[in-house]
Image (tube, rainbow, N blue to C red):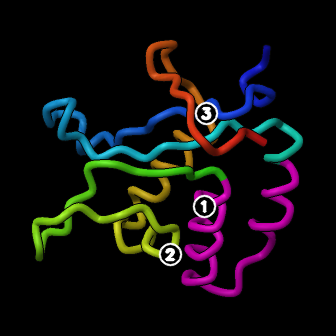
Amino acid sequence: MPLALEPNQTFKVVLESDKSKPKEEQPYFEFRFLSGRKWKELTRKKIGKSKDGADALDKLFELLKSGLTGWGNMIDPDTGKSIDFDLKNLDRLLTMSEAGELLIKFQNQAVESNDLKNSDSPSA
């Protein structure tokens, strides 16, 4: 069955800058699969014309949030403690270029079969 129709299927994305870390320590983002129809709907709503750079960045983060179901191994550099998953904190974790890289990887939704994971959040 197509992945966009498989409830609870997700995939992990690791930023290029973190791939040299040991696998068990790599920070990762977990996304659900989106259908082509859902992507069209989101891009029509979210992209549009931006008023300024900050507005464009807000729209980028909103697109990421539309499929983000979790993250792991995110460590606060000030406290050394894990940062719990909360969509409100996404812009705290990423640089602008990392947000762009993450969106490209989310849009590609390319995963190896061993990277598929069942999640509590259904695909759309």
Confirm whether the magenta stretch covers residue 57.
yes
Quadrant position of the C terminus in the picture: top right
Near mark 3 (Cα within 10 A), the count class, few <14, some 14-19 or many ≥20, is few
Label 1 or label 3, whichever lies nearer to me, is 1
Nearest the eye: 17 or 119:
119
Residue 93 in the image: state x and y as whole percent: 34, 66
Quarter location, residue 31: top right
Which residue, given by chain and number where applicable, does mark 2 sit on?
A: 88
Which residue, given by chain and number where applicable, does mark 3 sit on?
A: 108
Residue 8 in the image: state x and y as whole percent: 65, 34
Nearest the eye: 110 or 51:
110
Residue 55 in the image: state x and y as whole percent: 63, 82
Residue 101 to residue 4: above or below: below
Quarter location, residue 48: bottom right
Over which residues does the magenta segment extend?
A: 40-66
Q: Residue at x 45, y 22 (%)?
A: 115
Q: Residue at x 65, y 71 (%)?
A: 59
Q: Amino acid at mark 2?
A: Lys
Helix, strand or loop for disc 1: helix
Q: Earlier in the sequence, mark 1 or mark 3?
A: 1
Which residue, given by chain and number where applicable, does mark 1 sit on?
A: 65
Near mark 2 (Cα within 10 A), the count class, few <14, some 14-19 or many ≥20, is few
Residue 112 in the image: state x and y as whole percent: 48, 16
Magenta stretch: dominant secondary structure: helix
Q: Amino acid at mark 3?
A: Asn
Q: CA distance from mark 1 to mark 3?
A: 16 Å
Q: Earlier in the sequence, mark 2 or mark 3?
A: 2
Q: Decide if residue 65 is on the left or right side of residue 25.
A: right
Mark 1 in CB contact with mark 3 (< 8 angstroms): no
Q: Decide if residue 60 is on the left or right side of residue 16.
A: right
Q: CA distance from mark 2 to mark 1?
A: 9 Å
